[in-house]
Amino acid sequence: MVDIPDCKTLRLVLGDQLNRQHPWFESSDPDVLYLVAELPQESTYVRHHVQKIAAFFAAMQAFASDLEERGHRVLHLTLDETAEFDDLPGLLDFITEQAGAEQVEYQRPDEYRLVKQLSTWARQAELTVTCCRSHHFLLPFADIEQAFPDDKSQRMEHFYRRMRRRFDILMEKDGKPAGGQWNFDPENRKRLPDDVEVPDALVFDNPIKPILQRLGDHGIKTLGHSDAESLPWPIDRRQSLQLLDYFVDCLLPRFGDYQDALSGRHWALFHSRLSFSLNTKMLSPEEVIRRATDAWGDDPDSIPLSSVEGFVRQILGWREFMRGIYWSRMPGYAALNQLEHERPLPEFYWTGETRMNCMSQAINQSLDHAYAHHIQRLMVTGNFALLAGVDPDRVDQWYLGIYIDAIEWVEMPNTRGMSQFADGGIIASKPYVSSGNYIKRMGDHCKSCHYKVSARSGDRSCPFNSLYWHFMQRHRDWQESNARVGMIYRNWDRMGSSRQNAILQTADDYLQNIDSL
Ligand code: FAD
Ligand code: SF4
């Protein structure tokens, strides 16, 4: 172990608390020592994508160096120094004792697991332990209880409108929404035409060889295809701001149009890829929103309002909403499995080896880049898992491990709630399921697929088609009364029993041989 310098106050900075603008860092204090530590427990609570761990560790290292350059005292520990400690409390006990610290301060973690661990430790620690705000989200933590009463199903749209008014974002002076509409969803659902050029993704070239070496030395098991020695993701505030500028200048004008598009031509389309910078707090949600709305205000002719509103909705609406759901419903939320789904996750989620072109594309790019955009996560991989009845615990583990931005507070409500309907409708008013038709309409995968999207049953029929009807049949009892779903059952009933039987038989065959699809 390295020498531990003396300090009166030890301040813990977790890997997703790289907020350079936090009041802690306004001035330096020689009595304060900041601890930034690579932790075995954080590297192994799920099997992570190699780029995800490397990005967190590289960003923590860059943050520690930045603090030092600004005159703060920092103890940056790598796995080489922390490997001997079973968990974070063990490390804190050791360091506080060695440093002779009188108090420890930490920012409130965003994950239930860490809040519990640190508050339990604080109760039995023999020094003063203080928890403070992380100064990141727009909605103060203290307001969550009131904004998310647990006796009601929540709807994002209502929450989002309240947030627009409260923070005066895209609002006219008379209290009406900019452009007279709250929602431009119908304009934001276009398929990507062949002649629209998608700019290259802005990628960085951050060296990570020593980090990969450490992961190997300490036996940390990872997933993902890439073992490249450089990391394309932003690892500090400067690079994060560069990515934000690139998004606003080059991608935002078409973000709205193609935010729901699927395409084999490009892995990120017009999406911002800002989720890692946001979730590690290198960028604040408010500054990202303001940057987009200011660009629109400066030049409304070059950026459609539908694009800006669509983007703001993701951050001010969905992101804050998911956090509210998580904190108002944990810890019970993590165990919800309303549809009683139990199937193991098919092996091809880990290998990308499937003949379903849309799935192969979404999974392989996730393994390659630790990234898939929202519609790939929701309407391709999530849709398939839900149709097939996969156990939400296994689905959660996959999403939590594979994506660069996956942190439980945002991953779980998206996966278990929005995508798998395991919360029984707290987030979504009905399950997000679709047949192959939706994937065909939104993208270009079907034309070169092994399966036929036009066929509902029989050899080589698109698995999404028969599984869709199988799902609808399995869950008819409780779904039929939902006005938005009832019509679908009228269509099914009109099909006649021989076609219905053929479809259900195909689905059964596919489910029995799911790993070879
Ligand atoms: P953009 O499309 O450019 O959107 C801009 C920003 O809006 C994102 O960076 C993100 O911060 C925010 N945002 C958009 N949609 C959501 C949403 N539904 N919930 C919360 N924030 C949103 N997002 C994560 O940050 N971490 C996760 O672990 C995660 N897991 C998901 C799992 C499933 C099954 C699904 C369906 C969605 C998940 N999302 C998650 C939400 C969303 O898919 C990602 O935020 C988005 O794809 C990140 O890419 P981007 O930065 O290019 O997003
Ligand atoms: Fe996906 Fe079906 Fe289209 Fe193939 S045919 S790409 S499996 S939706």
Image (cartoon, rainbow, N blue to C red):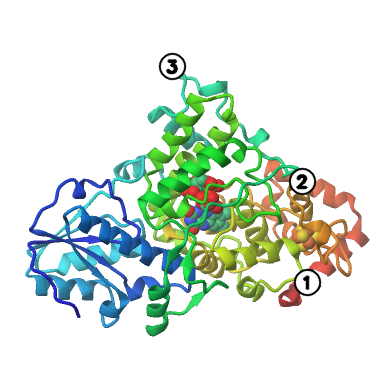
Residue 277 at what x, y percent from top left? 42, 52
Q: Amino acid at mark 1?
A: Tyr
Q: Quadrant of the C terminus?
A: bottom right
Residue 325 at what x, y percent from top left? 44, 49
State the residue at coordinates (18%, 45%): 26
Q: Residues within 10 Å of mark 1 (few under 14, many from 20)?
A: some
- As drawn, the label of residue 241 is none
Give how far apart the Cα atoms at labels 3 and 1 are.
Answer: 57 Å
Which residue does the numbered mark 2 point to in the structure image? 194
Q: Amino acid at mark 3?
A: Lys
Q: Amino acid at mark 2?
A: Asp
- As drawn, the label of residue 173 is 3
Is 231 placed left or right of 67 in the picture? right
In the current view of this chain or complex, which residue is farthest to the top? 174
For residue 14, say whether it is visible.
yes
Is 443 placed left or right of 179 in the picture? right
Residue 293 at what x, y percent from top left? 47, 31
Find ligand 2 in the image and state its quadrant. bottom right
Which residue does the numbered mark 1 point to in the structure image? 510
